[in-house]
Amino acid sequence: MVDPSVKIPLNVSSLVGMVFPLLAVYFVTALLVIFPGTVVWRRSLLPFTLWLGLRVGACLDVSGGDPIKAQANQSHALFTFMIVMRCIVWAVYSDQVRPIPGTPADANVKRASVRAALQNACDLALGFRELSWQGPSKPRTLLQVPPSQQRFPFLRGRILSVILHLILGDALLFALQSFSPELSTPGGGSVFDPSLPASWRYLRSTTMTFLFGTLIYVTTRTVYDAISVLAILILRQSPSQWPPLFFSPWRATSLTELWGDRWHHLNRSYMVALGAKPVSRIFGRAAGVLGAFTISGLMHDLGLRAVGRGSDFVAIFGFFFMMGVGVVMESAWKSMSGRLPSGIGGRLWILGWLGLWGNRAADAWLTRGAAASGLVPGPYRPFKLVWAFVTEP
């Protein structure tokens, strides 16, 4: 039996008994799905993947017993959810996934060696957007220029990006924590201050909501850029396998553009394959959109529960589901007017819709300590170091 209330600390024993087996079945499934005639083996592995994923996601404690670092359990639970869902997609899929012609994965297939096959398995397993592959969910090309194929300029740019975004993320965290000392504690604090008049109360909560949302963007980009550097230095992957994760989401003028083109696609493959496609076949495209956002809502709610302080299902699930509702509303508007929202009006529409549903979602996260710590330990926080240097007499 899996008891989520009993947390198992991350140590050598849990690594060997829980984490490594889950990663092993994940990589083996990724290896199998690139070859034909392996669907029986993939489906045979799936029960083990589900069991191991449930144990790791629900029971493993990666915080080291430090309540301030409990949000790390949310990150590892989200990662676990992602790899388990991908294994489900590969098990359900009766065919193999094939490389897109002209990609490094396609070149590896033509080499037909054990090393090339292992490289392709790593590319598929580590590349959540599946940019080199076509299968149950074809990749969506973001509105961006491909990265430089030269390794040194690419690495230099990404390392600089990591440094700058670490400082920016810490500055955002510093600004968020300045609203209330409670936000720096494991118990967290609310975006709502009942002592303020309604207008000021919601101005405060909305400001904090957008600060928190921006912090999520900056943190996600920082981690992705750091991983891309390691993948190229250690795994010898190509810069073309690590294009930018986002494309200026602040430039979006519609929710469709924001979530479809400018936000990251780390979860797109399984949300389309398990949510959008099957639901749209039965109930139509609009329901398919809601199906994809339903999986997103469930994923984030389960992630927050992994922190060990409960969740607010209506707030967390509701935010992501209502993003889907907003996309469906834009589709209806386009069918009547011939175009999606655009310009200043489109930007105001996005801000209004995000703010309307984001206040409660941000409150649910922040009252559970989401702003208690950042990527860097307290004494070494980059913004504080920079601030101390600038303000030192």
Image (cartoon, helix red, strand yellow):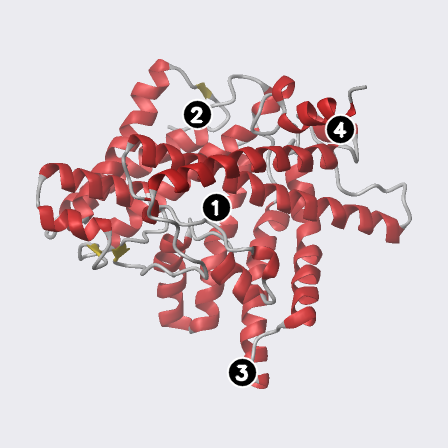
Residue that numbered label 2 is attached to: 60
Residue that numbered label 3 is attached to: 335
Residue that numbered label 4 is attached to: 182
Circle nearer the N terminus (2, 1): 2
Point out residue 35 in the picture as x, y percentages from the top left corner.
13, 49
Circle nearer the N terminus (4, 1): 4
> In this rendering, which labeled residue sits more in front, label 1 or label 3?
3
Name the amino acid type tagged 1.
Met
| SS at badge 2 | strand
Name the amino acid type tagged 2.
Leu
Residue that numbered label 1 is attached to: 299
| Label 1 packing within 10 angstroms: few (<14), some (14-19), many (20+) | many
Q: CA distance from mark 2 to mark 1?
A: 17 Å
| Label 3 packing within 10 angstroms: few (<14), some (14-19), many (20+) | few
Point out residue 125 in the picture as x, y percentages from the top left corner.
29, 42
Name the amino acid type tagged 4.
Glu
Q: Is residue 207 above or below residue 100?
A: above
Q: Residue at x 46, y 62 (%)?
A: 143
